[in-house]
Every structure is written in C-alpha cells, then in structure tokens.
C-alpha cells in the first residue's frame, strides 16, 4: 500500500510541474503588450534626441508627456483585457489542472494494472535462499502448532508433526506428539514403533520400560513390525539377556530381504555379540566402532573412580554399560555412585531414577 501512495505523490508532483507555468501570475504577468513596449521605446528615443540636441528641453518634455498619456491609456486597456478575458481563462486552466491531477494518476494506475507487472512488487526476482527456505519451514511448523493448539484432538496433525520434530532434533516434542497421535487415533503397529523409537532416542539409545512396552504392543498387533522387533532385541541385550538378543536378531535377519535397509545394522549387532549370521560361516568379532565406544566408556569409568564426578556423569556411565549389554558393570557403577554421592541428596535422586530406567533397582544395596 505504501508504494502506491508514493507513486501517487510522484505523479501529482509531475503534473503540477507542467501546470504551474499556466497559473494566473505567470501567464498574465509574463505577457508584454506590443503597444506598451512601443511607447516605452518612444520615450527612450525622445531622451536620446534631447541628448543629441535634436530637441529642445521644452519640446522633449512635451513629447514625453504626450507619450506618457498614451502609455497610461495603453495600460488601462491592457488591465481591462485581463479582467475581461483573464478570469475565464484562469477558470479553464484551474479546471484543466483538477482534471489532470485526478484523471491522469487514476488512468496510469489502471493501465499499469492491466498491462504492467504489479506482482513484481511482491514477488522476489531471485531464487529463494536456503535461509528463506528454513524460515518458511519454521513458519509452516509454527502454523501447524497453532492449529493443534486450537484443535488438540486432531490426531492426524500430531502424527504428521511428530516426524518433523524428529528431523528438527526436538525429540522430546516428538515423543509428546506421538503420545497425542496414539491418544486420538488409537494404537497401530507402526505408530507404536515410532513412539517407542522416539523414547529411545530421547534416552540416548536406552530402551526404557515405557519404550519396551510400546514395542511389545506393536509386535502383538503385527509380528512383522521390523522396527519394534529390532528394539526388543536391543532391550534384551541391554538387560543382559545376550542369548535372547542373538536369537531375536538372527530371526529378524532371516526374515528380512537381502536388500532391506536394516540388514546391515542387524548384521553389525550380531557381529558385535559374536553370533554367527545367516549366510555366513564366520562369527563376527567386535567392530572398530564398538571398540572405540568401549574405550571411551572405560576412560570415563577410570576417571570417575579416581577423581569422582557429577551425578550426571555417573548416570551416563550406568547407561553406557547398559547399552553395551554389561548389566553387571552398570549395577556396580550404581553402587559406586551411591557411595560417592552419599551427601548429595539431589545427586542420589538422579542415580535412583537412572537405576529404575535401566531396571537395576533390584541391585540397590
């Protein structure tokens, strides 16, 4: 809207620049009557004749008086003409000015709207940048969130938003979104599997009791739910049930197509556990990645045992052992943490919470 106001002001200024010279002051005052000019020149000529001596001073004064009377009469006629003719002309000029000021801008805008490109004022002429795309994506997410705030019972909306949260790294929000989707749409194998996976990611890879329950419900609804079966095998591994974990990984691998995208991950898990894989006569040893992880966990354990640390660090070590399937070490770490944090009430609560999540609560002294 501002751009149109600016254009109108510019148009009006251009019209006034053209019409201003036609105003009364400049149009009338700027005109010189030829008779008046003639008599002015006659008086100048009389002055020159007197200067040369061609006329006596008395003769020159008489001639100037007669020329002056004629000049006055000529000026009077000129003023009358202005009064008789100038006013109607002035009115016509004013009417023309008003017409130009009103019609010309409107006509110009109408022609521009019909044949011009007014949309270029609001359409970017360059490709949308990555920053702009991110902004638009964030705006779209905000709009969906606003819709769901007004319509929280829209289960489909929550189910669409949950994986978006996952890609954005907002895992806790994804967990809540899947909870809402389950609440309003009901349980379904894929929905339960995604919900459980979000909870696992929120716990840094730990299959909590709640996540395991979601995976078990998913498999009960659909035995072929790959994601749920994979995480149930991991849960067994974390619980120290290594043989059960091997059996479940092997069964999942046997039932999967050779080119399934999850086959490589399942083979890695079996290789890490030292289990023979279908189609292979070898038993896999620990992978380099696993060795690196074990080395880092060992370094953290050594530091906590010798120098101590925060409750969060002790809890992280407990979780790391559980993820690696070393539940005995996880339980021993919980005991050490309780001793090291005996005077830290808040720290002890953190350790007990982690022990419950890892299902180590029975190992407490």
Image (cartoon, rainbow, N blue to C red):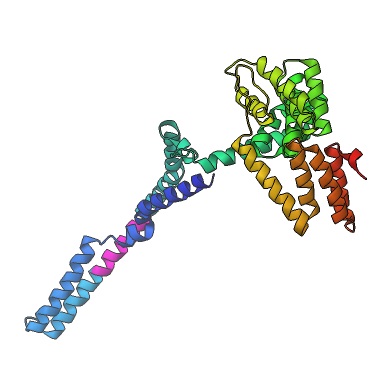
Identify the residue at image location x=45%, y=38%. Answer: 127
Q: What residue span does the magenta drawing correspond to?
A: 71-83
The x, y position of residue 194, in whole percent, is 72, 27
The x, y position of residue 113, in whole percent, is 45, 34
Identify the residue at image location x=78%, y=24%. Answer: 244
Secondary structure that dominates the magenta span? helix
Of the pair 81 and 207, the residue shown nearer to us: 207
The reply to whether residue 298 is in sight is yes
Image side of residue 16 versus residue 47, left or right: right
Image side of residue 302 versus residue 343, left or right: left
Of the pair 2 and 198, the residue shown nearer to us: 198
Taking 189 as reference, is 269 above or below it? below
The extreme right residue here reads: 365
Taking 310 as reference, is 187 above or below it? above
The x, y position of residue 242, in whole percent, is 76, 28
Image side of residue 363 versus residue 181, left or right: right
Taking 317 as reference, is 67 above or below it? below
The x, y position of residue 150, in whole percent, is 78, 34
Q: Is residue 339 magenta?
A: no
Of the pair 347 and 288, the residue shown nearer to us: 288
The reply to whether residue 146 is in sight is no
> Residue 289 sits in which quadrant?
top right
Q: How many marks?
A: 0
Q: Is residue 79 magenta?
A: yes
């Amino acid at each position: 809207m501002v751009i149109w106001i600016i254009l109108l002001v510019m148009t009006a200024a251009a019209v006034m620049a053209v019409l201003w010279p036609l105003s009364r002051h400049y149009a009338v005052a700027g005109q010189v009557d030829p008779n008046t000019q003639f008599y002015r020149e006659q008086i100048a000529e009389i002055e020159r004749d007197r200067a040369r001596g061609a006329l006596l001073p008395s003769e020159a004064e008489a001639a100037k008086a007669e020329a002056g009377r004629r000049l006055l009469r000529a000026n009077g006629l000129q003023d009358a003409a202005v009064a008789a003719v100038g006013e109607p002309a002035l009115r016509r000029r004013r009417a023309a000015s008003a017409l130009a000021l009103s019609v010309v801008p409107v006509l110009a805008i109408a022609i521009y709207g019909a044949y011009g490109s007014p949309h270029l004022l609001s359409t970017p002429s360059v490709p949308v940048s990555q920053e702009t795309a991110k902004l638009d994506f964030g705006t779209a997410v905000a709009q969906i969130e606003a819709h769901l705030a007004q319509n929280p019972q829209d289960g489909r909306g929550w189910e669409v938003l949950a994986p978006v949260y996952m890609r954005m790294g907002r895992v806790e929000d994804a967990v809540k979104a899947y909870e809402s989707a389950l609440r309003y749409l009901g349980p379904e194998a894929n929905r339960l599997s995604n919900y459980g996976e979000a909870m696992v990611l929120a716990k840094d890879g730990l299959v909590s009791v709640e996540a395991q329950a979601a995976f078990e419900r998913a498999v009960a609804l659909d035995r072929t739910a790959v994601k749920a079966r994979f995480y149930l095998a991991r849960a067994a591994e974390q619980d120290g049930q290594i043989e059960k974990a091997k059996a479940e990984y092997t069964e999942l691998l046997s039932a999967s197509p050779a080119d399934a995208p999850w086959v490589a991950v399942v083979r890695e898990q079996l290789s890490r556990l030292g289990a023979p894989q279908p189609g292979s006569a070898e038993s896999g040893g620990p992978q380099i990645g696993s060795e690196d992880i074990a080395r880092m966990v060992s370094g953290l354990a050594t530091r906590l045992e010798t120098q101590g640390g925060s409750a969060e660090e002790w809890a992280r070590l407990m979780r790391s052992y559980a993820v690696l399937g070393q539940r005995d070490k996880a339980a021993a770490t919980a005991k050490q943490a309780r001793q090291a944090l005996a005077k830290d009430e808040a720290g002890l609560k953190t350790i007990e919470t982690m022990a419950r999540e890892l299902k180590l609560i029975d190992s407490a002294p």
